[in-house]
Amino acid sequence: MLQQYFIELGEGYGDIYELMELMKTNSQRLHRTFIFSSNTKSGQAISLAAAFHPAQDSNFMPIYICREGITQKDESKSKRRLLFEEASVELGKEPIFIGLKHSSEFADTKLFYQYITGILRLNHLVPPLQ
């Protein structure tokens, strides 16, 4: 049974570089990249994520995420977001932009990740639960 699991890297500048390095070193496994946006009182909270095909014969599809570490007050894109978009395009994976509820609206981050997984599956952006 193929299952998707979120692996949180962190919210800082260095974590974005770690995510991009994972994408580059595992480019043959890279499935898709995502930019998730949530509205907050102070603007938008941006999460960056990359989904990878399972390694060898495993049924584990990792989705690495830097959750809500970027805040935007206007339409301009932050340097971290631009770097992520450039890295994605270089690897042939145009990032998919998805608007979401903010994680603070959920009692637990597990519920938040189940919510995102459901959206990704319903939109055929990751394989269905088999």
Image: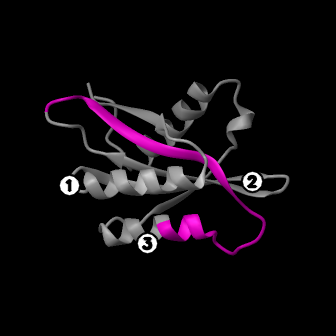
Three-letter code, disc 3: Glu
Residue 28 marker: 1
Instruction: Please report whichever mark, 1 or 3, sits nearer to the chain's N-terminal start.
Output: 1
Q: Image quarter for residue 94? A: bottom left
* Range of magenta residues: 57-83
Residue highlighted by disc 2: 39
Residue count near mark 1 (Cα–Cα under 10 Å), binned few <14, some 14–19, many ≥20: few
What is the CA distance from the residue labelled 2 to the residue labelled 3?
24 Å
Give the mark count: 3
Q: Which of 63/70 is in front? A: 70
As for residue 24 lying within the magenta part, the answer is no
Tell me which numbered mark, 2 or 3, is placed earlier along the sequence.
Answer: 2
Quadrant that contains the C terminus: top left
Q: Under tag 1, what secondary structure?
A: loop
User: Dot 3 corresponds to which residue?
Assistant: 86
Task: Identify the residue shown where x is 47% and y is 50%.
Answer: 49
